[in-house]
Image (cartoon, rainbow, N blue to C red):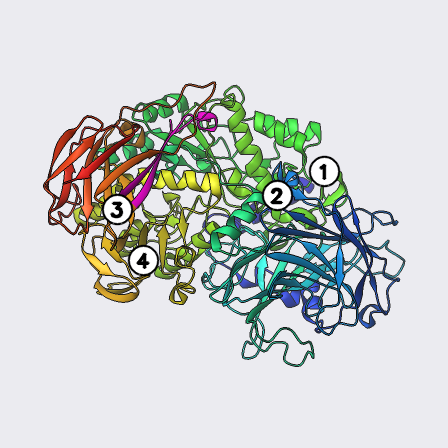
């Protein structure tokens, strides 16, 4: 009877969670703030309710330390035990970074230690600490009590106000504030307690019960950004780039921005609801002061309110009225206060400051920056071979073919269905012969099958997450009854990484890379389709404390495994759906299970821009939409905008119609071919930008205001974006559009990248919306490197010549860069690369070496030449060019801007100047 019951339960779950039924967002599957006790409690607190004061303020080990104690009993907590002192530590780091930690005092007895997120802050960050030697104190303004002042930089100071407790950063000379915490007295820190008889701590949602063995442990506080017009960041949400207020006058029934990694199908656009990833990092920007940032290193569920103007009208709290500000309210279920204040003052300064804490983007292999073709699922080896050959037949380049879960043996990862894929190595080798690669999927749920070697070993070693009773957690996912690897444990992550060796992953080859899906983690029969909060991880950590970082550790372990597989020589490629602060160090992410509609195309742009602002440059959205069947016009428009995503992949659900680019008639095939070719033409430019992100953290694609921080018209624009500092791309997001409005910043000209037509900046242009492209403009004063010969894949482009497109500004000057390495290894870390800076001024183009001298390694070499140099906006009528060294002359003639697609009118072109890309040289226009 028990066997029959288990069979019936399994059948029911398969019906409930079959791919055909998991297809839409169901609001009642997920909690809102009122159904989330810690959020409801925090939102109910009034400004000024915090009674904490700072005492025993001193310097210890180079930090400011203090105790936070209540000045008077908290009326909201009068039924609880006396509040124990909290331990405060304030540290200062180079480049304008202040870190504030508040935790329960470790010297006092507690039921357990609160979780602090490990392995997110980069190695070496602590070496940037500025050791405080002393404190100064002063009474600020009309305060009755002293404040302690610490040095941040020559221009900024940190202030700890003792009574009432508040922390803020101010400009040293003017005293103007930059960032503050607890200015509105909303700090609340629920301390861990031992459960007593009569305590009812359990929480219920639908059919699930959370035992909450340590009781309420939430933290909440207010953060204010001064001189700010807008705030941005805190992904992942399908909403506008500039975050809209969620509380305040005229805002009814709005939810906070939720940070809780969830498997959400066909998520709603324009919603604060949390989806696959969580990065608790917010950036403010305004014309008055510039840019600042705030990061809370905490992996528990978080809810964040952006407070509308006038929200605190009745609070009686007076803040500097001369400074415009944006107030926010941060709430988390667990963890500690571990926060970072970034003072900017520019947009790129704040991004660099944040990246110094969480790390820069991994440098991808060149192939990964090209076009990827994916579907759930390509059926078998014959289907793979047919799709591959069709790309060649239709003369469409691509680099990567993907296999979803159906390629496995019964959804057991690291295996192959030997009926459908009997010769996986040969299949991959055929792709590799054309310079192409394959990606297969590996998810964190492990099928509970005693004949499955991964499960057998993980179970024997005790490597699974435990349930609240201490048994291996058993949840439901694609593989049926499943357990989940405990990625918090470094030993287990190392074990997992070993599974990607060629010996362990039978059928894999060096051209195979990995896709991590469902790693929020997704649990079909769990509360909110995820793991119960009282599940247990390594060291007794509850899942509630580290939920948002689970997928990050899974991504990390997989990436490290691929590095081990290649003996440290091969750069990994791993795509992850779940993400957290620092995910940029391990590979790419995408925006998850979107839909084939115009709204999802539109919202993909601010989603990708937000990820870039918060460190993750290598991101994209499923081109065409994962769910549903796009009309040809929508699919074409998606390819045209997707060609500028950092991660460019077409993907679709298996219930959708096939949508490879050649299935919609010759005209639409041509339009999608042109879009993909545009990406390949611009790959040298994109790869150079990926290197910039790898070194500085500045994202590949950027909001307009990052490049034009004083232009107020750009602050809330998210329908257009910058690729690097040189290219502005405007999306077309409406069906049958005849015209599109494009705002071009600054007063210099912008050149249409297809026609070379010049448009004046600092104004909005109403342009035709032709079917063959979305508007894209090269900024005057920039130089963009291209490769104009179309090949099957990036590997076959390696020795092709380059084209330089020089867009001159009103001073007849321009500059740009080109970065080249071997496109696959880590040798670039040892100086094996070419980095050139091109400068055009006073009629002369100069190539300068930006790479440091190498020691102990052979430098990277390239025999590639420059084939064409195109001048846009040249004021004279040049006829010849003088090339040095060599005193060689080259003729200047009229030539097309593009060799492929629509031909444009002639532009001054230096053809075949005969110079190598790696050399120093000058070209004087005569």
| Vertical position of residue 308 compared to residue 169: above or below | below
Q: Measure the alpha-carbon separation of dots 2 and 4.
A: 34 Å
Dot 2 surroundings within 10 Å: few (below 14), some, or many (20 or more)?
many
Label 4 and label 1: CA atoms lie apart by 46 Å
What number is the disc on residue 538? 1
Residue 539, percent across and down? 75, 39
Front position among marks 4 and 1: 4
Q: Position of residue 844 (x, y in %)?
A: 23, 40
Mark 3 or mark 1: whose residue is earlier in sequence: 1
Span highlighted in magenta in the image: 815-841
If the image is split into quadrants, where does the N terminus sit? top right
Q: Which residue is mark 4?
A: 731
Which residue occupies 21% across, 65% down? Answer: 738
How many numbered marks does the figure carry?
4
Of the image marks 2 and 4, the number of the one nearer the N terminus: 2
Q: CA distance from mark 3 to mark 4?
A: 13 Å
Pick the residue in front: 763 or 170: 170
């Amino acid at each position: 009877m028990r066997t029959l019951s288990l069979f019936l339960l399994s059948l029911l779950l398969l019906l409930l969670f079959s791919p055909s039924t998991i297809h839409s967002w169901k609001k009642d599957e997920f909690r809102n703030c009122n159904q989330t006790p810690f959020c409801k409690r925090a939102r109910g607190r009034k400004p000024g309710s915090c009674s904490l004061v700072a005492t025993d303020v001193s310097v210890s080990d180079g930090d400011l330390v203090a105790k936070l104690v209540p000045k008077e009993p908290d009326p909201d907590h009068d039924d609880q035990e006396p509040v124990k002192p909290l331990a405060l530590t304030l540290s200062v780091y180079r480049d304008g970074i202040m870190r504030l930690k508040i935790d329960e005092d470790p010297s006092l007895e507690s039921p357990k230690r609160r979780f602090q997120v490990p392995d997110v802050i980069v190695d070496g960050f602590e070496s940037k600490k500025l050791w405080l030697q002393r404190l100064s104190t002063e009474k600020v303004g009309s305060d009755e009590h002293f404040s302690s002042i610490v040095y941040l930089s020559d221009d900024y100071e940190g202030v700890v106000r003792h009574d009432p407790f508040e922390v803020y950063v101010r400009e040293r000379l003017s005293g103007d504030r930059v960032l503050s915490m607890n200015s509105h007295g909303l700090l609340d820190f629920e301390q861990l307690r031992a459960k007593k008889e009569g305590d009812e701590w359990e929480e219920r949602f639908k059919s699930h019960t959370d035992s909450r063995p340590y009781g309420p442990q939430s933290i909440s506080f207010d953060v204010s950004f001064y001189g700010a017009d807008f705030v941005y960041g805190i992904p992942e949400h399908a909403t506008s780039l500039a975050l809209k207020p969620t509380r305040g006058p005229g805002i009814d029934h709005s939810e906070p921005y939720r940070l809780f990694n969830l498997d959400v199908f066909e998520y709603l656009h324009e919603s604060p609801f949390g989806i696959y990833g969580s990065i608790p990092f917010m950036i403010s920007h305004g014309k008055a002061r510039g840019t600042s940032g705030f990061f809370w290193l905490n992996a528990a569920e978080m809810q964040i309110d952006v407070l509308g103007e006038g929200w605190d009208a009745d609070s009686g709290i007076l803040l500097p009225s001369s400074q415009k500000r944006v107030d926010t309210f941060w709430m988390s279920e667990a963890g500690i206060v571990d926060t970072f204040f970034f003072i900017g003052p520019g947009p790129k300064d704040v991004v660099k400051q944040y990246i110094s804490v969480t790390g820069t983007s991994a440098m991808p292999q060149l192939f990964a920056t090209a076009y990827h073709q994916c579907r759930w699922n390509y059926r078998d080896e014959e289907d793979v071979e047919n799709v591959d050959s069709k790309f060649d037949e239709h003369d469409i380049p691509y680099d990567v073919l993907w296999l979803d879960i159906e390629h496995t043996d019964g959804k057991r990862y690291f295996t192959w269905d030997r009926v459908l894929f009997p010769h996986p190595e040969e299949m991959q080798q055929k792709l590799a012969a054309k310079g192409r690669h394959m990606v297969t999927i590996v998810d964190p749920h492990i099928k509970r099958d005693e004949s499955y070697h991964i499960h057998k070993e993980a179970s024997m070693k005790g490597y699974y997450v435990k349930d609240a009773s201490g048994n291996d957690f058993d949840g439901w996912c694609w593989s049926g009854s499943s357990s989940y690897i405990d990625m918090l444990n470094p030993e287990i992550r190392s074990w997992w990484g070993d599974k990607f060796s060629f010996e362990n992953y039978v059928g894999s080859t060096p051209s195979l890379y990995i896709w991590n899906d469902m790693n929020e983690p997704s649990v079909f029969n769990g509360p909110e389709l995820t793991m119960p909060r009282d599940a247990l991880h390594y060291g007794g950590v509850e899942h509630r404390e580290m939920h948002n970082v689970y997928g990050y550790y899974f991504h990390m372990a997989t990436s490290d495994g691929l590095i081990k597989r290649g003996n440290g020589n091969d750069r990994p490629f791993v795509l992850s759906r779940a993400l957290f602060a620092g995910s940029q160090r391990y590979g790419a992410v995408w925006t998850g299970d979107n839909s084939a509609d115009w709204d999802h195309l539109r919202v993909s742009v601010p989603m990708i821009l937000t990820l870039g602002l918060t460190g993750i440059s290598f991101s994209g959205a499923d081109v065409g939409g994962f769910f549903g069947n796009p009309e040809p016009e929508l699919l074409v428009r998606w390819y045209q905008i997707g060609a500028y995503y950092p991660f460019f992949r077409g993907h679709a659900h298996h219930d959708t119609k096939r949508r490879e680019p050649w299935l919609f008639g010759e005209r639409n095939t041509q339009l999608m071919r042109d879009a993909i070719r545009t990406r390949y033409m611009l790959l040298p430019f994109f790869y150079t930008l990926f290197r910039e992100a790898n070194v500085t953290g500045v994202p590949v694609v950027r909001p307009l205001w990052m490049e034009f921080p004083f232009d107020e018209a750009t602050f809330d624009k998210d329908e257009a974006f910058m690729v690097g500092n040189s290219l502005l791309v405007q999306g077309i997001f409406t069906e049958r559009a005849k015209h599109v409005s494009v705002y071009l910043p600054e007063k210099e000209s912008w050149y249409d990248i297809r026609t070379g037509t010049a448009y004046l900046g600092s104004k909005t242009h109403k342009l035709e919306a032709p079917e063959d492209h979305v508007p894209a403009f090269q900024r005057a004063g920039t130089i963009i490197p291209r490769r104009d010969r179309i090949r099957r894949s990036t590997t076959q482009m390696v020795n092709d010549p380059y084209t330089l497109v020089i867009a001159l500004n009103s001073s007849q000057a321009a500059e740009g860069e080109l970065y080249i390495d071997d496109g696959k290894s880590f040798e670039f870390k040892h100086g094996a690369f070419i980095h050139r800076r091109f400068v055009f001024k006073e009629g002369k183009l100069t190539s300068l070496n930006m790479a440091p001298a190498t020691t102990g390694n052979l430098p990277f070499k390239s025999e590639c030449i420059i084939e064409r140099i195109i001048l846009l906006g040249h004021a004279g009528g040049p006829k010849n060019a003088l090339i040095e060294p060599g005193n060689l002359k080259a003729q200047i003639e009229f030539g097309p801007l593009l060799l492929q697609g629509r031909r444009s009118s002639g532009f001054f072109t230096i053809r075949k100047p005969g110079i190598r890309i790696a050399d120093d040289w000058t070209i004087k226009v005569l």
